[in-house]
Image: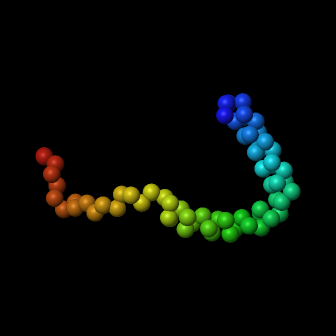
């Protein structure tokens, strides 16, 4: 797919999102507190917890 078609698809998606949000804004605002509560555990699950190594800081290898 060339760049022109990507721009057409992106523009159409933005217009559709605007129309859907405008028509259903009350539902979106009603669900917002629940979405914020759902975001908390999702951030804990997917936020990078890769550096859980236990470093021993009792020995100092730096020279004076």
Q: How is the image coloured?
A: rainbow
Q: In front: 47, or 10? A: 10
* Image coordinates for residue 14, horizontal then vertical, percent: 76, 44
Q: Is residue 11 left or right of residue 61?
A: right
Give the residue displayed 50% in from the left and 65% down from the top. Answer: 44
Q: Is residue 34 left or right of residue 42?
A: right
Give the residue displayed 80% in from the left and 65% down from the top. Answer: 27
* Occupied quadrant, residue 60: bottom left
Give the residue displayed 82% in from the left and 59% down from the top. Answer: 25
Q: In front: 6, or 33? A: 6
Q: Is residue 34 left or right of residue 27?
A: left
Toward the front, the furthest residue is 1
Give the residue displayed 66% in from the left and 34% down from the top. Answer: 1
* Image coordinates for residue 13, horizontal then vertical, percent: 76, 45
Toward the left, the furthest residue is 64
* Image coordinates for residue 42, horizontal then vertical, percent: 55, 64
Counting the numbered discs, the total is 0
Q: In front: 10, or 41? A: 10
């Amino acid at each position: 797919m060339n760049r022109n078609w990507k721009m057409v698809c992106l523009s159409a998606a933005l217009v559709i999102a605007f129309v859907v949000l405008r028509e259903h804004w009350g539902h979106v605002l009603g669900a917002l507190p629940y979405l914020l509560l759902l975001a908390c555990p999702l951030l804990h699950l997917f936020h990078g917890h890769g550096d859980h190594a236990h470093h021993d800081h009792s020995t100092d290898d730096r020279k004076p």
